[in-house]
Image (cartoon, helix red, strand yellow):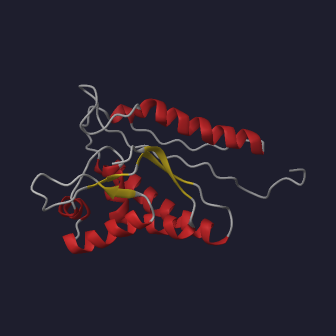
Amino acid sequence: MAKQKPAVVITDPQAIRALAHPARQRVIDELYNGRVLTATECAELAGLTPSAMSYHLRALEKWGIIERAEESTDGRERPWRARAASLRIDSDTGGAGRLAGHAIMRTAMTGVLEQFQELPDDDLWDDVSTLSRSRLWLTHEEAILFGKELNDLVDRFKKKRTQSDHPAGARQISSLYAVVPIGKAPEDS
């Protein structure tokens, strides 16, 4: 099997829209965190039937997001894995790309909200929960650098850690950030 790429970058609006389905995002989260799962295991995670999940897995494979892993020893189940260490969505700013980006952001934001709601009141790690919203005045070049540095920071902390390979005492942390230009572009840009 070919070596995994460092990142899968999705730019096609149809592929981005395909990612917006909550069941697909749930499975992508697990696969991109190092798990290798069968269609049945993915179905259990997403609350779907195995046949419905198989449809979603084939769609994700079609867009190059996931791939088949090596077969199990008995050959009956063929598990799935991420095609790369990370997944990045780069949608263009117009038309279908923007609408697809909106759809995936809605689904992702709902998932993060649910994670905040599911955190027990007495959780010992509650002090690391945070949500921050800021407005910055940046040039176009600075905004590009800002987004790149955020991605680099996440990658630095990710350090190829997975569900099966992380330090003792480590806990999975969910993060979500967005860099969004607001208002009209300045006349001199």
Q: Residue at (78%, 42%) from the top-left corner?
A: 139
Q: Nearer the viewer, residue 177 or 36?
A: 36
Q: Quadrant of residue 147?
A: top right
Tell me which residue sits at (25%, 44%) in the image: 120
Residue 172 lies, in percent from the top left, at 31, 38
In this rendering, the answer to whether 177 lies above or below 155 is below
Give the number of callouts. 0
* Side of 54 where 144 appears, left or right: right
Q: Please identify the quarter of the rendering in which residue 49 is found.
A: bottom left
Q: Can residue 107 be seen from the camera position used here?
A: yes
The residue closer to the viewer here, 45 or 184, is: 45
Residue at the top extreme of this rendering = 168
Looking at the image, the residue that sits furthest to the left is: 74
Q: Can see residue 20?
A: no
Q: Residue furthest right?
A: 188
Picture coordinates of residue 1, whole percent (x, y): 33, 48
Residue 92 screen position, x and y as percent: 65, 61
- With 41 as the anchor, is 187 left or right in this view? right
> 69 or 23: which is nearer to us?
69
Residue at 37%, 59% (x, y): give it: 25
